[in-house]
Image (cartoon, grey):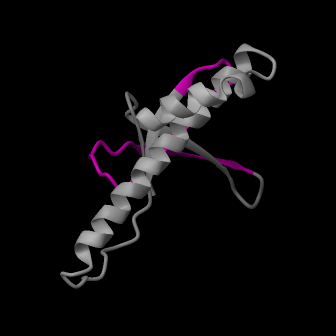
């Protein structure tokens, strides 16, 4: 698996071995641009926000017939846009919830319009 974070060169991964010992692994961050990654946001306890893309190497795809390629391309593009829109809406939803009690409900229409514009 490849993890990409903006502005980060290395990530330290802590895992617990079967004997209870903690193993420390340093992972180099991949800097390549690939549209098939999964974008994510990590919010720390101090409110610090980090954006990144997680990719899993699954191997090469099988060949497709010429008639199916345009449909696949459009479908993938549509799904990526929907993921981006939903991520933007969740960010706005959380921000509204932090600002006021029931703030997400008050800002529902505005947040949906902002998310759709992305």
State the quadrant of the N terminus.
bottom left
Q: Is residue 24 visible?
A: yes
- The image quarter containing residue 64 is bottom left
Is 34 covered by the magenta stretch? Answer: yes
Single out the residue that lies furthest toward the front. Answer: 109
Question: Which is more toward the observer, 74 or 30?
Answer: 74
Taking the image as shown, residue 97 lies to the left or right of residue 35, namely right
What residue is rendered at 34% in x and 56% in y? Answer: 77
What residue is rendered at 67% in x and 21% in y? Answer: 96
The percent position of residue 69, horizontal first and vertical second, equals 24, 74
The magenta segment is 21-49
Is 85 covered by the magenta stretch? Answer: no
Question: Which is more toward the observer, 20 or 30?
Answer: 30
Compared to 97, does 74 lie above or below?
A: below
Q: Is residue 42 visible?
A: no
Taking the image as shown, residue 63 lies to the left or right of residue 23, namely left
Single out the residue that lies furthest toward the top. Answer: 99
- The image quarter containing residue 13 is top right
The percent position of residue 17, horizontal first and vertical second, equals 70, 57
Single out the residue that lies furthest toward the left. Answer: 66
The percent position of residue 71, horizontal first and vertical second, equals 30, 71
Question: Which is more toward the observer, 115 or 19?
Answer: 115
Question: Which is more toward the observer, 104 or 33?
Answer: 104
Taking the image as shown, residue 48 lies to the left or right of residue 56, namely right
Compared to 68, does 12 lie above or below?
A: above
What residue is rendered at 29% in x and 51% in y? Answer: 34
Taking the image as shown, residue 67 lies to the left or right of residue 47, namely left
State the quadrant of the C terminus.
top left
What residue is rendered at 56% in x and 34% in y? Answer: 112
């Amino acid at each position: 698996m490849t993890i990409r974070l903006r502005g980060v060169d290395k990530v330290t991964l802590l895992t617990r071995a079967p004997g209870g010992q903690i193993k420390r692994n340093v992972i180099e961050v991949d800097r390549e641009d690939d549209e098939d990654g999964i974008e994510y946001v990590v919010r720390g306890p101090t409110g610090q926000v980090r954006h990144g893309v997680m990719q899993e190497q699954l191997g090469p795809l099988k060949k497709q017939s010429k008639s199916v390629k345009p449909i696949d391309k459009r479908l993938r593009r549509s799904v990526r846009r929907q993921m981006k829109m939903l991520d933007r809406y969740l960010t706005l939803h959380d921000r509204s919830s932090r600002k006021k009690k029931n703030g997400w409900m008050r800002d529902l229409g505005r947040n949906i319009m902002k998310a759709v514009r992305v």
